[in-house]
Amino acid sequence: MLRCADDSIYTGITTDIRRRVEEHNSGRSGAAYTRSRRPVELIYQENCDSRANASRREYQIRKLGRDEKRRLAGANRIKISVP
C-alpha cells in the first residue's frame, strides 16, 4: 500500500516493490491514480507465493475501509528504503 501526498491510500501488486514505487513517483509508468498525488510513500507490503494469491489479497485489502487500512499498515510498520 502506498500513502499518497493527499493522504489517500493506493493498493496494487508488483514483483519488484522498489522499482514500482519509483515508477509511481517518477510518473513514467505509475498508475493514473497516483500521477496527480505524488509523492507516494510505501506504508505496507505483503509477500505472496503467486500472482493469483496476490490479486486475491489485493482485492481483500481494497475492500477494507480507510481506518482498517491504516490499522493494517500501522500494525505492520515496514522499514524499506526506496530511492
Image (tube, helix red, strand yellow):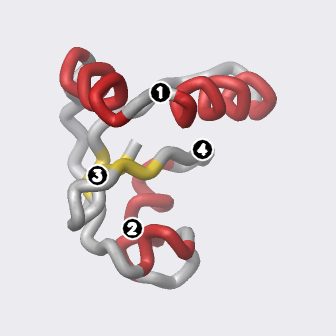
The quarter of the image holding the N terminus is top left
Q: Nearer the N terminus, badge 2 or badge 3?
A: 3
According to the picture, the residue beneath numbered tag 4 turns out to be 13
Residue beneath the point at 45% across and 82% down: 27
Residue 45: x %, y % from top left: 41, 32
Residue 32: x %, y % from top left: 55, 75
Q: Nearer the N terminus, badge 4 or badge 2?
A: 4
According to the picture, the residue beneath numbered tag 2 turns out to be 22
Element type at mark 3: strand
Q: Nearer the N terminus, badge 3 or badge 1?
A: 3
Query: Which is in the foreground here, disc 1 or disc 2?
Result: 1
| Distance between mark 4 and mark 2 Cα atoms | 14 Å
Residue beneath the point at 56% across and 47% down: 12
Residue 26: x %, y % from top left: 39, 80
In this view, 68 is above or below 44: above
Element type at mark 4: loop
Residue beneath the point at 62% across and 22% down: 48
Residue 74 location, quadrant? top left
According to the picture, the residue beneath numbered tag 3 turns out to be 3
According to the picture, the residue beneath numbered tag 1 turns out to be 64
| Distance between mark 3 and mark 4 Cα atoms | 15 Å
How crowded pointer 3 is (Cα within 10 Å; few <14, some 14-19, many 20+) is rated as many
| Distance between mark 1 and mark 2 Cα atoms | 25 Å
Task: State left or right for residue 34 relative to residue 31.
Answer: left
Q: Nearer the N terminus, badge 4 or badge 1?
A: 4
